[in-house]
Every structure is written in C-alpha cells, then in structure tokens.
Image (cartoon, grey):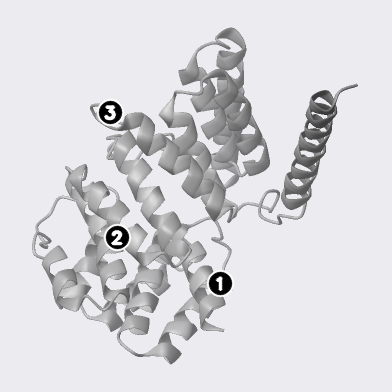
Amino acid sequence: MDSVMKTTILFTLLLTATSLSLGQTTAQSNSSNPFLDREPPPISAEAKRDMEAKLEEARERYRAQPNEPEAAIWLGRRLAYPGRFREAIDFYTDAIKKFPRDARLYRHRGHRYLTTRQFALAIKDLKTAARLTKGKPDELEPDGQPNARNVPTSTLQFNIWYHLGLAYYLTGSNAKALAAYRECLKVSNSPDRLVATSHWLYMTLRRMNRTEEAATVLAPISGQMEIIENAGYHRLLLMYKGTISAESLQAEALKEASSPGSYSILYGLGSWYLYNGNRTEAIRVFQQMLSGSQWTSFGYIAAEADMKRLR
C-alpha cells in the first residue's frame, strides 16, 4: 500500500471518528437541555384540546402531502404550539433535508432554538433564512394562533430579522442586534410590526449608551396608532416617551402577571430601570418574572439572560 493511499485511509478514519464524536456531543447536549422537554406554560383544557386536534390535522395533511413544504411547515408549527419543542426541532431538521432552500423552515426552527435557549443554533438558522430571502419580495406569514380580528400582522422577512435581532440581543451582541433590527425596521410596514421592532431597537440603543439616537426611534410612535396584537410594546414605547408613567404601566402588567403579554411589559420595565441606573429595581422585576411560569415568552428569556450577566 503506497503512502498516498495510507494517508487517504487515515484521513477518512479520522473524519469518520470526528463526525461520530460531533454527533455524540450534539446528542449529549440535546439530552441535557432541560428546555427541550420542559412542561409548557399552563393553558386551559379547551385550548389544549384545540391544539391537539389541529396537530392531528397537520399530521394527516403531511401524510397526504409529504412533498409539500407548506404541509411540513405547519406540522412543525403545530408540534411547537403545545410545547413539543424537541419533536418540532427534530421534524424541522428532517424537513430541511427535503427542502433545503425553503427559508421558512430555518425561520421556524430558529424560533424554537430560541425557545430552548440554543442561541448559537438560532443565529445560524436565521442568518441562513435571511440569505435565502435576500432580494426577494416579502410575504405575509399566516398566524397559527390568530388574534381577535383574525388579521395576520407579520411577514416572513420581518420574523427572520426580528428573531435574529433577538438572538443577538440575548447573547449580548448589541452591535449585531442593532444591525438586525435596522433591517427589521425596513419591513415593519404596519403599526404592529413598527412598535415591536421599535421597542427592541430602542432598548438595544439605550444599552449601547446611544441615548439621542434611541430618542429618534420614538418619533413615529403616537397614542393614536391602531394596534391589533402588540399593545404591550406600544405602551412601553409611550412610557419611554414620557406619556405613561412606569408605575402605572407596572401596575397594569402585574394585574395580568400570568399572561405572556405581561412579561413583555415587565421585561421592558426591568430593562428600562437597568439602563437608567436603577439596578436594584431591575433585578427585583426580573426575579419576579422568573418566579412565574411563562418561560417560553421572549420577555422571560431576556430577563433570564440579563440575570446571568448581572450575577
């Protein structure tokens, strides 16, 4: 056997061993991740029955249309809604092998990587989704859990940049978060999208001590905006402008302390206290949030990330 062949065989064996090692490391990481199988926040029995029924409908649709990416996307979404995050991520991973050019699969898997605190993987997926949609027209994203008006308020590209900005924000990569939210602002063409993006953009700028630039983010925000879903973000922005007091907004949120929407408000308040120098009150708000059950909400996840940095 000549030296070239020996080298080739050795390289192949090393590559195989490395692949197996990486696979084992990933499996071990997943098996030790408490968020993959954590009990989801409580919902009513009626809501749970509805989610399970729609999940079965999505399964049937996918069985009938296994080569339709739309059917795959909806099955992944329906798995995630009742809290089956491990199943959802595994399913998206298989679906991506079938439809590797569909940005929607990366966007949704990226979202669930955020839910399960796998931030580096979320960033990788969402960057891929951004690349796949670059230069293409944006498209409305249908709601899996419709609002009271049954009017979808978000788009694919909005959700890609919004979640990517959040992933960077959660990891303390403020400059990258700022760039992502700037891109998100370009596709925030409705009041609901505008207030959601503006809220995180404002907080990012304040954390970077760019106070004057942050103030310009508030200029388009008014009390007369017609908001369908993101009322919490809207009211936070009005508080940043001085139209609403922090005390009154905090009292409102505490009345609905068990709802995901209240966590958005409480996190905004805690963050506001933090970058205005009131560390003690910020920690108190964050600890109050983390004692609750809404661990899948972005407000909870952000409070959790901040508390790790504050220790």
Question: Which residue corresponds to the image point at 21% horizontal and 45% vertical from the top-left?
Answer: 188
Number of marks drawn: 3
Question: Considering depth in this image, is 224 or 49 the residue closer to the camera?
Answer: 224
Indicate the secondary structure of the residue bearing disc 2.
helix
Residue 290 is tagged as 1
Indicate the secondary structure of the residue bearing disc 1.
helix
> In the rendered image of this protein, does residue 113 appear above or below residue 156?
below
Q: Which circle's residue, 3 or 1, is located before the other in the chain?
A: 3
Disc 2 marks a residue whose amino acid type is Leu
Residue 15 shows in the view: yes
- What residue is disc 3 on? 139
What is the x, y in percent for residue 207?
A: 32, 75
Question: Considering depth in this image, is 140 or 147 the residue closer to the camera?
Answer: 140
Question: Which residue corresponds to the image point at 57% horizontal and 18% vertical from the top-left?
Answer: 98
Disc 1 marks a residue whose amino acid type is Leu
Q: CA distance from mark 3 to mark 1?
A: 35 Å
Question: Which residue corresponds to the image point at 28% horizontal and 55% vertical from the top-left?
Answer: 179
Give the position of the N terminus as an image quadrant. top right
Disc 3 marks a residue whose amino acid type is Glu
Question: Which residue corresponds to the image point at 42% horizontal and 89% vertical from the top-left?
Answer: 279
Crowding near the residue tagged with mark 2, few <14, some 14–19, many ≥20 C-alpha atoms within 10 Å: many
Indicate the secondary structure of the residue bearing disc 3.
loop
Between marks 1 and 2 in the image, the one whose residue lies nearer the viewer: 2
Residue 143 shows in the view: no
- What residue is disc 2 on? 178
